[in-house]
Amino acid sequence: MDTRKDVQWAFLYFVITVLLGLSLRVSYIADVFFNVRHVTHSHSHIGLLGWIYTILTSLICQHYLRKEDRKPYLILFICTQLSIFGMLFSFPFGGYFLYSIIFSSLFVLCTYWFSIFFLRRSKKYAFIRFSITKSVDTEPECPLSLKFVRWGVYFLIISSLGIWLLPVTIVKAGKGSDWYNSALYFFLHFQYNGWFLAVLLGLLVSEIEHKSLLSSKQLSTTLYCFVIGTIGSVTLSWVGFFDQPLLYIIGNISGFLLLISVYNLYTAYIRLERPALLMQVFLLLLAIKTVCMFLGSFPWIAKEVLANREFIISYLHFTFLGVIGFGVLHFLQKHLHIRFPYWSISLYATAFVGSEALITYKGLAIWGDLPLPDNYYLLLVVLSSPFIIAVGYWCCIIFNKTKDSPTQKV
């Protein structure tokens, strides 16, 4: 199933997300004409629900669905894009108000539609494509890569419970209360730790599951560790609001299980004959992220980190721009044969490392009472600007359909 046009839409949202993010950083050094809080909501929604959701659904539909599924999927895709455009043109002008809430709710309903669509159609095609059968008379075995992806879709559905609970918590406890924030963090956790990562790890497993790099038992253990660890580690999103020992214990065990799953996949992938550089970067960043999550299960660390807004922002950007970003670039090259030149990836990596280092340092400065440069926000704008060049160039590549470009592949 060709999803190249869908990828074009995803990268358009990526460019918009970067522009909105840069404009927010400019707001610290210059007077701006927009409401910063409203644009912040737009930035986060278009980034998560526009860019990342669209690119992930495009990748798994291309990998697991048939050509015949394209026409019914197109109707779903158009409805989803209408809801995203509604959020894009409502959040900047009013934040959370009637129209933005309507479009956000429509988007959630579209994710339910997609989940049913994908779960019903993907399994049958995967059986045919990967031919995992022992004989004609036996029930075909579901590829482990698809099990990862299907769990990602389950986490997508589960995450929406947090959205529906938000109005309940507002009525019962008030907006901004601990219960309100717990519901919001529940949604975010199952989005970026569940749905996002499960899809990317599923696509990774599709590259190694037939190469005997890990036994079937090891791969199954990896899946179980990831699923149980993801479900249990939601408690780490709540320890800042409810200081209960049981939450730390569950989070500690869950973080350890996630470390096992990442270790298994990393050791298996680097044993490939020619492991891709972008995937090695993705796995390295994922390992760092998982270690940070595991460390957050210790009370004396969690209390310092969760109280520091800069650490939280650094962690979220590290996940979205680093882990998710490099993983997506690899799979676009691997499955859609879209090639990105070295210089653009190097520029993106420079902006990522530079901006992350600055934000993290500010967190350390607040924590350790260290000096902060007078031109901190100007430096942040300068180091973030290369994102526009790199992502904008990638968008041009995809819209110009330079699929067969001779550009060297990473």
Image: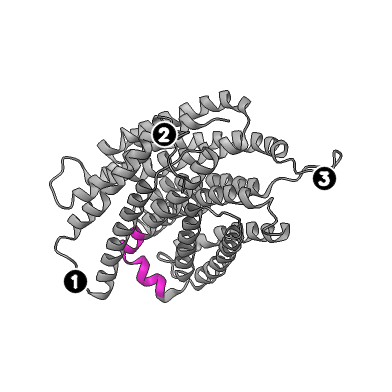
Mark 2 to mark 3 CA distance (whole Å): 40 Å
Q: Residue at x 57, y 60 (%)?
A: 270
Q: Magenta residues, as a range?
A: 301-314
Label annotation for residue 371: 1
Whichever of labels 2 and 3 marks the residue nearer the N terminus, that label is: 3
Is there any visible trace of residue 400 in the rendered image? yes
Location of residue 220 (image quadrant) = bottom right
Q: Residues within 10 Å of mark 2 (few under 14, many from 20)?
A: many
Whichever of labels 3 and 1 marks the residue nearer the N terminus, that label is: 3
Label annotation for residue 398: 2
Q: Based on the picture, tell me whether residue 310 belongs to the magenta stretch.
A: yes
| Image location (x, y in percent) of residue 156 | 53, 45
| Image location (x, y in percent) of residue 225 | 62, 61
The amino acid sitting under disc 1 is: Pro
Q: Nearer the viewer, residue 133 or 158?
A: 133
Q: Which residue is mark 3?
A: 134
Mark 2 to mark 1 CA distance (whole Å): 43 Å
Label annotation for residue 157: none
